[in-house]
Structure formats: C-alpha cells, structure tokens
C-alpha cells in the first residue's frame, strides 16, 4: 500500500510540472504574438510630410569661407585743419551737411596776415629801389672806367653792390610770397566731396596751427576693415567675394577683397583685409558688419546642414525610399554656401549618398526607420 501511494504522489507532481511548463510556453507565445502585432501596427502608421519637409540631394558647387567682422569705413575721408593761428570765422557747417571739393567751409581772421603781406611788399619795393641806385652807380663807374678816370676796382665794387641789391630784392619777393601763402591759408576749403561727420571747433574760437575744425567722409565708397589670423590670411586673395550682414540693414550686402595689408599687426600678428562694398545705399561709416568670406569652392553632392543628423556615433541622413524612411550613413565633408546663392542656407557635402535622393529636412525630427511616408501633395522636392 505504501509503495502504491508513493507512485501516485510522484505522478501528481510530474503532472503539475508539465501543466506549469505548458502554461509558461503559452504565455510566452502570446507575448511574442502581441509584440509582432504591435510592430506591424507601428510600421503601418504613416507619417505625413509636406513638400518643404524634403529636399533632393544634388551636385552643388559649395563656396567655403572664413567668418569675418569689423566696422565700415569710408575709403575717402579728410580732416580740415587750421593752417594758421587766429580767430575762427564763418563756420556754419554742422554734422550731416554736404560739402563739395573746394568749397569754403570757414576762415581765420586775416587782419594780421594782411598787414604782414603789406609789410613784405614794402620791403620788396625798398629792395627794388636799392637795385635802381646800384644800377645807376654801376653804369656811371663803367663810363668812367672806359674813359680812364677811375680804376677797374671801383667798377668791380659797384658790380658787387648791384648783385647784392638784386639778391636782397629776390629775398624780399620770396617773403611776399610766404606772406601771401599764409594769407591764403586763412581760407579753409573742403579737400573732398562728402558729408561733415564732425565739427570740432566753434565760430569765434581761437585756433592754433593744425587744430582740427571739421571732418568730412565720402559715403559713396565704403569698405570693411576685417582682421584675420595669420593662418586664415594665407587663403585670402584679392577679388574673393564675401556676404555681409550689416547692423540695421535687413538685406545682405556683397563685398569683394580689394586690398590686403602686406604687414602683420605688431603684437597680435593679425592681418588686415579690406573689402569694398558693392552697395552703399543707406549705409554709414562705423556700422558693424559680419559675414563669410569665400576662400575656396568644391563640387559635391550636398544637403542642407540641418538635414545631417549626428545623434548617433556616425552621421546619417533620413531619406525616403519606396515610401518608407531609411537611415543612410554618410560621410560629412566641406561646409559652406551655395556658390550661386550666397544668401541661402548652409550646405554640407556628403559621401555615400546618391544624387537625387529624397532627404528629410532636419526640422521634421527623428523618424523611426521603416516608417511609412505619405505626402500631403505630390512632392517636387526642391534642391538644396
């Protein structure tokens, strides 16, 4: 009896274990089926994209460049300074007034200098009178020498006196010229055509020699003075084009390198590069500008920089193939602006992507690979 009971107990245990294993296998199979169904549901869910959400990867000429910044300066500017000391008169110009080259802008009181001109002229006249006296004496002595009444030495003496009188007269005439030049310098004229940018003196004020009176700038030609490092300046050449954004001006302005300073700045070893602006309407001296100077060009298959995703160890782009999202690993290359559209978005050259591939813009965000794609309207994806 005891042995039969033992076998019954073992049979019950084996049966219970078998039932448990069967239930576990059934639960696992159900979980797997549920996961497969969930995956199929996710794959069947399509994402809608607008035409602007995708872009075609195309062969583009990329203009690479250097970031530059600086202040605008007038190519031509001038400071009108007093050339003689005296009381300033007739200054009516103020900042913003237009002037023309040669226009009288102010005067220095000429009273004292007019007197000096008269004094120098009187001295020249006196010297001229001495020439006449010396000339008559020489003529008389020459006649007497010819007649044998006086020696040759007396004639030589009168000749020397005549030469000295002539030299004195020439010196007096030079003094007249100097006095008249000083008198002319009392009239201050604009050396260039432009606009008054600074008025540094007031009418009635006594100014000294080289005292600044007004400053004039010519706004018809402006340039950007940019500072580059020695390493960056090696790739810069005259004629290279830049796109600038100027404060207060919503439209970008193009500029070209017109000069490169042949010497590096002491201390910083930086190099000054001067870019002439193609358009100066509404611009002013001193405005801050920044932009990109194109230094090289390369042709490659390119996409917008925002479409290149870097949330994985290797960069990739999201493309639409056969109506689904596919992640394409790519190699990132040169970055820059489209050489035909310098004001457009930044492009990046990519390797491993065929031209014509339909790339999803970075603004769409990350999409699961395999997600179905449906366009809101027929897509004629724009080029980057």
Image (cartoon, rainbow, N blue to C red):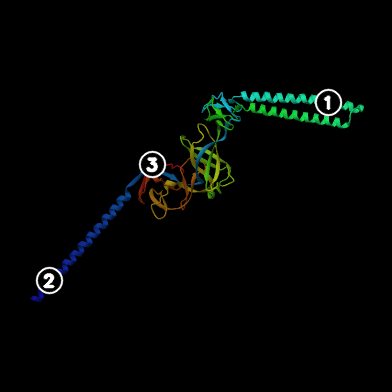
Which marked residue is nearer to the observer: mark 1 or mark 2? Answer: 1
Task: Name the disc covering residue 50, or none.
Answer: 3
Q: Residue at x 37, y 46 (%)?
A: 365
Among the two numbered marks 3 and 2 on one chain, the one whose residue lies closer to the N terminus: 2
* Residue 42 coordinates in the image, percent (x, y): 31, 50
SS class, disc 1: helix
Q: Which of the pair 274/308 is nearer the observer? A: 274
**Is 375 on the left or on the right of 244, as rendered?**
left
- Mark 1 vs mark 3, CA separation in Å: 112 Å
Q: Residue at x 87, y 27 (%)?
A: 142
* Residue 323 coordinates in the image, percent (x, y): 38, 48
* Residue 262 coordinates in the image, percent (x, y): 59, 46
Task: Name the disc covering residue 9, or none.
Answer: 2
Q: Residue at x 86, y 27 (%)?
A: 141
Among the two numbered marks 1 and 2 on one chain, the one whose residue lies closer to the N terminus: 2
Question: Where is mark 1, residue-wise?
Answer: 137
Callout 3: 10 Å neighbours few (<14), some, many (20+)? some
Q: Residue at x 22, y 60 (%)?
A: 26
SS class, disc 2: helix
């Amino acid at each position: 009896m005891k042995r039969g009971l033992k076998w019954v107990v073992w049979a019950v245990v084996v049966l219970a274990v078998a039932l448990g294993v069967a239930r576990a296998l059934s639960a696992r199979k159900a979980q797997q089926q549920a996961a497969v169904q969930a995956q199929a549901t996710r794959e069947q869910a399509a994402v809608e994209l607008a035409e602007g959400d995708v872009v075609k990867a195309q062969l583009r000429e990329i203009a690479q460049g250097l970031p530059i910044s600086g202040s605008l300066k007038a190519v031509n500017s001038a400071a009108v300074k007093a050339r003689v000391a005296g009381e300033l008169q007739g200054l009516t110009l103020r900042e913003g007034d237009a002037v023309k080259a040669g226009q009288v802008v102010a005067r220095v009181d000429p009273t004292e200098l007019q007197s000096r001109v008269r004094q120098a002229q009187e001295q020249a006249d006196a010297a001229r009178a001495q020439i006449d006296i010396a000339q008559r004496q020489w003529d008389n002595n020459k006649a007497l020498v010819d007649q044998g009444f006086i020696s040759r030495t007396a004639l030589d003496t009168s000749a020397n006196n005549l030469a000295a009188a002539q030299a004195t007269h020439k010196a007096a005439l030079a003094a007249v010229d100097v006095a008249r030049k000083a008198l002319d310098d009392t009239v201050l004229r604009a050396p260039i055509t432009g606009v008054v940018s600074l008025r540094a003196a007031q009418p009635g004020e006594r100014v000294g020699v080289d005292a600044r009176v007004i400053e004039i700038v010519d706004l018809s030609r402006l340039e950007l003075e940019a500072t580059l490092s020695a390493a960056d300046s090696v790739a810069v050449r005259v004629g290279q084009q830049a796109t600038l954004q100027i404060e207060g001006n919503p439209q970008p302005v193009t500029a070209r390198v017109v000069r490169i300073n042949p010497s590096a700045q002491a201390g910083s070893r930086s190099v000054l590069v001067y870019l002439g602006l193609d358009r100066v309407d509404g611009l002013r001296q001193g405005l801050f500008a920044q932009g990109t100077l194109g230094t090289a060009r390369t042709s490659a298959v390119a996409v917008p920089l925002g479409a290149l995703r870097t949330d994985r160890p290797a960069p990739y782009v999201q493309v639409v193939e056969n109506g689904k999202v596919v992640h394409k690993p790519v190699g990132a290359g040169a970055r820059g602006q489209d050489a035909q559209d310098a004001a457009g978005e930044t492009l990046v050259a990519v390797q491993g992507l065929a031209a014509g591939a339909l790339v999803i813009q970075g603004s769409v965000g990350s999409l699961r690979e395999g997600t179905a794609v449906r366009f809101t309207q027929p897509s004629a994806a724009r080029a980057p």
